[in-house]
Amino acid sequence: MELIFDKIQPPVINQPLILAVDDDEDNLMLLTEVLEPMKCSFMTATDGQTALKLAQKHQPDLILLDVMLPDVHGVEVVHRLRQNRQTMTIPVIAVTALARVEDRDSLLEAGCNNYISKPYMLDELEAVIRCYLGLIPSFAESESACCG
């Protein structure tokens, strides 16, 4: 399967739109593997500036945001999203290798709605996504992480 990054998958009416942001294309491919079976439309970005532009233009239902980006740090991306009237209410889940409690706290204080550490369990990620999108999780998923 060929993925075109910094592009948008064709939107489908009544499907949630997710923006996945990560500078590692392998991580983006893994995220798309989670999103495709969930019947979500998605778009990807490999840097913070592109993520900000896509978020403002398309106003996705959820943003999965890597923190360590090449141009703009993820915390700054969240700050800018929260200052923009068009993007301030979009839920943002930090998906990052930063695993210290201080990192988690600073991301939540910056405006992230939730936090998932890499490497993550796919079922945990899917459960959090379903929760923020208001999709009904299976019984097994409802036992794992949900909206913070």
Image: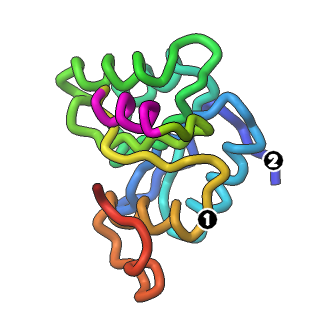
* Mark in the foreground, 2 or 1: 1
Residue at image coords 71%, 38%: 4
Residue 62: x %, y % from top left: 38, 46
**Residue 1 colored magenta?**
no
Pick the quarter of the image with the N terminus. Answer: bottom right
Q: Is residue 10 above or below residue 66?
A: below
Residue that extends furthest to the bottom in the rendered view of this protein: 139
Q: Is residue 93 above or below residue 22?
A: below
Dot 2 amino acid type: Glu
Give the magenta range.
101-109
Residue positioned most to the top = 71
Query: Which residue is at the front of the view, 93 or 7?
Result: 93
> Dot 2 lies on which element?
loop
Determine the residue positioned at 32% across, 17% down: 80
Q: For the residue carrying disc 1, how many other residues have a C-alpha within 10 Å: few (<14), some (14-19), or many (20+)?
A: few
Image side of residue 15 versus residue 109, left or right: right
In this rendering, position of residue 106 left or right of residue 44: left
Q: Which residue is mark 1?
A: 122
- The residue beneath circle 2 is 2
Q: CA distance from mark 2 to mark 1?
A: 21 Å
